[in-house]
Image: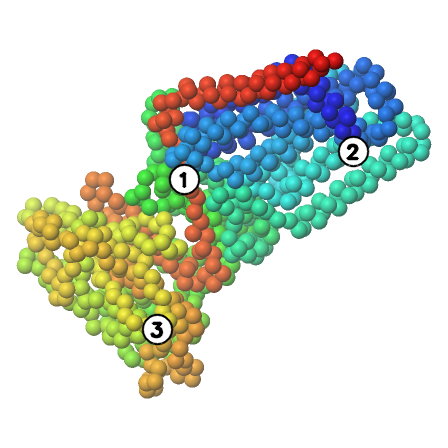
């Protein structure tokens, strides 16, 4: 067998056709990767070799048949096959020897592409900003696919004595196995389509081309190679099939081989592992996400709305969405189907606008992006959503998020990092898996239903929100979280006991509290004052490790505005109003990671106090350009309107929201318990491990009103010019509630970090011709150099005789 292997390799490398074929392969790949603008690495702008691994298979479809077409066809045509059969070799040894030689040549053809790796390595920003482990995994996938194509090419060569016919058959078989089967799957729907698609080479190659090694894919590739080689061996043996003992033996070996392949695939399908070679483990799902997917009891349909004809950055974004959905499907107990829909696809402008309006009427907001179309800057509308359909329920998930203050590339990368979390929480909501119950405290002047209209409407999709009046219940029972939203009236001792015991029994809480109150109708003229609310909650918060200070904080950097009448003209002016501001500094915590600015109104600072065993994490901060007004805090439109002294705003950063975690001590420990209107039978003096969030702004979930209509939560209508209008209050609250109630740790998916790997675009464009020449000529030079050195050694070796 090894003699055949050496003979085939030497015979191929001794011929000029070998270098021509491999040279054509390298030239084709080089043009696709470095010259053609649609697939050029330089124009793509990211330090990746995706073009090589996505288009390489199609070039392989022609290269590999050119290598294998003569291996058996020429032997039969020239009559040397009979001579070969006189050797003490079995049919399978002959076939396998030829297969190994062809496969070795395929690997040889890939080696010069290391020039591409070197080039992208050098063009990275910074130099070397490349996912080397992931690229190694992708090369493994390409080489394994080459192994399958090699076996197919060898089988085609066994079918005909004519090399051209063998070449054409091999190209057809490779194309059908890689693309044809998956195209055939598109004819069908549901589980049938999925089963058919799983038989295609592209289905199994896709994951490996991304650096994700799945044992099932490895088994599939090796099984396909084995089956095709068995078929080749069976065809090879047909000349002796008239001899019954030989026929029986050949069929038995073929049948046994198929049985072993089938058994191995059954085992692999049920016991598999996936090894993510990428540096950031970008394709590795969190364990809580996998557990969630295992609880699905119906198929899930995912409609991706980004569409087609996208700028490079959004092509990358869409690709990441598709890859994540495919990963979700791997671990789901039910099939997950996805499709890509383009809301802008229409034959006329009128029809396109009608489509846009239909999606907007369903509650989706488009995003305007800019693209370059043949040198012309154009604007496009996209809908960066996925629509989930589960049974008779439908829900949309916005995926384009991130900190709006970051650069566009950074914001898009933050959105990439959040795809798993957004999809997982969307699935959890639509499937009603482990649905939680929220108690919305009432009876103390809290925000009314109109002021929290959008909170109640949007969050009720994910949670059961139940208003609860503390004076009308003896205990807060069966609530996972309680929310206190801007109380203005005092809490009785009995009310505090109910809140305290909710926490002592392991419940969670969000306290959104204004320390001072102000009547804005009195803010004109000489103004008014912000005075402390008499809530009687200080002792409760103090026991838990927090103190809400009696002050207002003003932020001059991210100030909001307030509509006022400045003169007798009845003209409304949006006055600069630093009592309202967008807080855009956050701690590195899953709740606030990659979060956009949160809009706050009349916010107070928070101090921490000693509380043994309690971990205190500040979540949100002001900017450093602040000013503190202690109670009684003067509030005057006229004073703010004429104020122009920046030195007043040098107070530094202040935390305005805290997360408290640990085992809390009851306010009523070692004290006389209330007697009336409470249940003291289950009194607990200490809590198990639980969580509390305290925010120094009671308005953080309040939506603004305009002409009696509630505006969306986080929307600020009082802006000038290009000032920020949409804030992430809704995202912050959703993350906060998810973290508090997330016993399984689903929110940890927000910690996923995907490193941004851009090219040095200025250098790449400046040195474009240089790198094109290096990558077109470099691999060919390596190939020619190898041929010259090999020929020199060969001539020198045989000149001695």
Looking at the image, do the residues carrying marks 1 and 3 touch, with CB atoms under 8 Å apart?
no
In the figure, 234 relative to 365: above or below?
above
**Quadrant for the N terminus in the image:** top right
User: Residue farthest to the right?
Assistant: 244
User: Residue farthest to the front?
Assistant: 800
Q: Is residue 753 visible?
A: yes
Question: Which residue position holds label 3?
Answer: 612
Q: Tag 2: Cα neighbours inside 10 Å, few (<14), some, or many (≥20)?
A: many
Seen from the viewer's position, the closer of residues 170 and 704 is 170
- Numbered tag placed on residue 230 in the rendering: 2
Task: Give the mark count.
Answer: 3
**Quadrant for the C terminus in the image:** top right
Q: Nearer the viewer, mark 3 or mark 2?
A: 3
> For the point 64% across and 41% down, which residue is it?
217
Q: Position of residue 211 (x, y in %)?
A: 55, 39
Seen from the viewer's position, the closer of residues 21 and 234 is 21
* Colouring scheme applied when the structure was drawn: rainbow
The mark nearer the N terminus, 3 or 2, is: 2
| Separation (CA) of disc 3 from disc 2 | 71 Å
Q: Position of residue 234 (x, y in %)?
A: 82, 30
- Numbered tag placed on residue 756 in the rendering: 1
> For the point 31% across and 62% down, which residue is it?
658
Q: Position of residue 404 (x, y in %)?
A: 31, 44
| Separation (CA) of disc 1 from disc 2 | 46 Å
Looking at the image, do the residues carrying marks 3 and 2 touch, with CB atoms under 8 Å apart?
no
């Amino acid at each position: 067998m090894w003699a055949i292997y050496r003979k085939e390799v030497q015979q191929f490398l001794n011929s000029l056709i070998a270098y021509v074929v491999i040279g054509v392969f390298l030239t084709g790949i080089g043009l696709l990767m470095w010259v053609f603008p649609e697939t050029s690495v330089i124009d793509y702008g990211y330090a990746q070799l995706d073009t090589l691994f996505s288009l390489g298979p199609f070039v392989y479809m022609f290269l590999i048949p050119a290598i294998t077409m003569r291996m058996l066809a020429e032997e039969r045509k020239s009559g040397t096959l009979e001579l070969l059969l006189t050797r003490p070799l079995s049919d399978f040894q002959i076939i396998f020897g030829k297969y190994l030689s062809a496969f070795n040549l395929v690997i040889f053809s890939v080696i010069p592409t290391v020039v591409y790796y070197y080039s992208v390595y050098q063009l990275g920003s910074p130099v070397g900003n490349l996912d080397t482990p992931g690229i190694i995994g992708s090369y493994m996938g390409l080489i394994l696919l080459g192994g399958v194509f090699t076996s197919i090419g060898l089988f085609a060569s066994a079918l005909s004595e004519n090399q051209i016919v063998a070449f054409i058959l091999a190209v057809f078989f490779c194309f059908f196995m890689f693309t044809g089967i998956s195209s055939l799957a598109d004819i069908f729907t549901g589980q049938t389509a999925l089963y058919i698609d799983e038989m295609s080479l592209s289905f199994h190659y896709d994951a490996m081309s991304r650096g994700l090694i799945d044992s099932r894919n490895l088994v599939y590739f090796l099984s396909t190679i084995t089956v095709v080689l068995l078929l080749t061996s069976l065809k090879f043996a047909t000349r002796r099939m008239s001899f019954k003992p030989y026929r029986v033996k050949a069929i038995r070996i073929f049948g046994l081989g198929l049985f072993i392949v089938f058994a191995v695939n059954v085992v692999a399908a049920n016991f598999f592992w996936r090894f993510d070679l990428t540096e950031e483990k970008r394709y590795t799902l969190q364990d809580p996400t996998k557990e969630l997917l295992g609880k699905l009891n119906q198929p899930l349909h995912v409609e991706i709305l980004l569409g087609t004809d996208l700028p490079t950055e959004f092509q990358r974004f869409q690709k990441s969405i598709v890859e994540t959905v495919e990963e979700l499907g791997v671990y789901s107990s039910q099939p997950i189907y996805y499709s890509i829909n383009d809301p802008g696809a229409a034959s006329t402008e009128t029809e396109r606008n009608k489509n846009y309006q239909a999606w907007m009427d369903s509650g989706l907001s488009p995003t305007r992006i800019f693209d370059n179309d043949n040198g012309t800057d154009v604007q496009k509308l996209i809908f960066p959503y996925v629509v989930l359909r589960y049974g008779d329920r439908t829900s949309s998930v916005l995926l384009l998020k991130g900190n709006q203050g970051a650069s566009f590339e950074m914001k898009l990368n933050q959105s990439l990092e959040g795809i798993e979390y957004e999809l997982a929480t969307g699935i959890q909501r639509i499937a009603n898996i482990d649905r939680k119950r929220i108690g919305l405290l009432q009876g103390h002047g809290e925000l009314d239903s109109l002021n929290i209209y959008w909170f109640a409407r949007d969050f009720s999709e994910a949670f059961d929100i139940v208003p609860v009046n503390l004076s009308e219940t003896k205990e807060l029972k069966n609530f996972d979280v309680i929310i206190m939203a801007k109380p203005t009236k005092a809490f009785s001792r009995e009310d505090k006991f109910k809140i305290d015991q909710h926490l002592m029994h392991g419940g969670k809480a969000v306290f959104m509290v204004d320390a001072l109150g102000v009547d804005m109708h009195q803010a004109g003229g000489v103004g008014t004052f912000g005075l402390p609310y008499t809530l009687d909650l200080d002792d409760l918060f103090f026991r838990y490790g927090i103190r809400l200070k009696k002050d207002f904080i003003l932020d001059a950097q991210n100030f909001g505005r307030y509509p006022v009448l400045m003169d007798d003209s009845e003209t409304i002016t949006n006055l600069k109003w630093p009592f309202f501001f967008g807080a855009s500094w956050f701690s590195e915590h899953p709740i606030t990671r990659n979060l956009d600015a949160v809009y706050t109104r009349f916010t107070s600072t928070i101090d921490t106090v000693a509380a043994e065993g309690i971990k205190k994490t500040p979540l949100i901060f002001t900017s450093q350009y602040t000013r503190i007004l202690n109670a009684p805090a003067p509030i005057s439109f006229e004073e703010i309107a004429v104020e122009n002294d920046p030195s007043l705003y040098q107070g530094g950063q202040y935390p305005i929201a805290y997360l408290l975690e640990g085992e809390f001590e009851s306010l009523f420990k070692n004290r006389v318990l209330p007697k009336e209107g409470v249940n003291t039978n289950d009194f607990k003096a200490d809590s198990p491990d639980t969580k509390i969030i305290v925010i120094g702004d009671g308005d953080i979930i309040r939506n603004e009103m305009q002409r009696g209509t509630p505006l969306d939560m986080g929307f600020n209508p009082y802006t000038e010019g290009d000032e920020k209008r949409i804030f992430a209050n809704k995202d912050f609250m959703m993350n906060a509630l998810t973290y508090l109630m997330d016993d399984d740790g689903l929110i940890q998916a927000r910690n996923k970090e995907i490193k941004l790997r851009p090219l040095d675009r200025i250098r790449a464009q400046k040195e474009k011709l240089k790198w094109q020449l290096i990558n077109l000529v470099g691999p060919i030079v390596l190939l020619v150099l190898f041929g010259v050195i090999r020929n020199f050694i060969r001539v020198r070796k045989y000149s001695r005789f």
